[in-house]
Amino acid sequence: MYNTLWITFLVALAASILVTPVAIRLAPKIGAVDIPLDNRRMHTKTMPRFGGLAIFAGSTTAMLIFLKFDPRVVTIVMGGALIYILGVIDDIKHLSAKVKFLGQTFVALIMYVNGIRIEFLTNFLGEGNSQLGDVLCFIITMVWIVGITNTVNLIDGLDGLAAGTAAIASLCIAYTAYIHGTYLAAGAMLALAGATLGFLPYNFYPAKIFMGDGGSLYLGFMLATLSVLGTVKSATLVTMIIPVLVLGVPIFDTFFAIFRRFVNKRPIMEADKGHLHHRLMKLGYGQRRATLMLYGITAIMGVAAVLFSRGLYVETLGLTAITFMYIYIFLTDAQHTVPQIKKNDTQAEEDDAKE
């Protein structure tokens, strides 16, 4: 089993490395390009945004070869294909937020109907409360899948940020699943990690290609649904806390974005430049350093998730507190330091290029 897991990872990695150059050449031909039309963009030139093809192809190939024996994996792969197609259409046709949300909800519903669901409430409430448990199970499953799908999409604002964050999260969840003997979840997460890491060298600053909504929505969807397979052979509630911890930073960033837009009386789905990575850019760190800083924070939360799965709750709490202390510093310093920063975002990127 150990060798199979490594082979799954390597096949996904190799497939992604091979497909990415193809995606770079294909993107302009199908109109999957990102043109910087507003100051929210971190880049200044037209970029191909079809890199999700490599992530999708690499992970799907590996999972269908080595994990097709489990019908749940096949179901998730089919759902991932639908989400990926939705994202690609958005990359080319620029769908409205409502249409994308409806599409994500429809795919999440398909997953629920086919048994990909969060059932800890049903189990906790017992048979006598099965009706209430089923209702809550449905609501939480739908919110989880749609929410995490969009969480990864929202952090895709710097070169390599979403890809690297997803890779770290996948590897941490895979390791947690492996040490607890849940090899199916470990293999699926390694396939996702391998495909993402194969794409990352092309996407890290300065990027040659973006993953586009096809890639970011696919990554979010796969992280959400594959984590439902379970990482620990114990209570399902414990199983679900692990991906919440690993994805703690993007989840927090999403909630903070919703709160920020609500307070400012702006549409919830409206894009802005208030995310953590934007604040780090305003502090003058540049894309490369801002991305690496957020990688580090995600890795800390990943270690916290592993410790939590081993029952080391005090250590988990300590690492989580450290993480949010750093996030607090980023949020407050970004507000107080910006007026003193004389470099704009473009100058910070130029500084990165000189390193």
Image: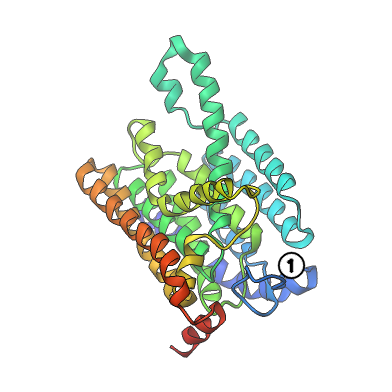
- Residue at x 35%, y 65% (from the top left corner): 296
Query: Mark 1: few, some, or many residues within 10 Å (few <14, many ≥20)?
Result: many
Q: Is residue 54 visible?
A: yes
Compared to residue 156, the image places residue 238 above or below, namely above
* Closer to us: 332 or 223: 332
Q: Quadrant of residue 206?
A: bottom right
Q: Position of residue 277 (x, y in %)?
A: 48, 65
Between residue 219 and residue 250, name the one nearer to us: 250
The relative height of residue 179 versus residue 278 in the rendered view (above or below) is above
Amino acid under disc 1: Ala
x, y (%) of residue 69? 52, 42
- The quarter of the rendered structure image containing the C terminus is bottom left
- The answer to whether residue 183 is left or right of residue 72 is left
Residue 183 visible, this orientation:
no
The number of numbered badges drawn on the structure is: 1
Using residue 133 as the reference point, say whether residue 56 is left or right of it: right
Q: Identify the residue shown where x is 53% and y is 84%.
A: 347
Q: Which residue is mark 1?
A: 32
Residue 141: give x, y in percent of width and height.
Answer: 53, 33
Label 1: which secondary element: loop
In the visual, does 135 lie left or right of 36? left
Residue drawn at the location 62% of the way across and 38% of the way down: 108
Where residue 214 appears, as percent x and y from the top left, is: 65, 58
Residue drawn 31% across the image and 56% down it: 325
Whether 147 is drawn above or below 18: the answer is above
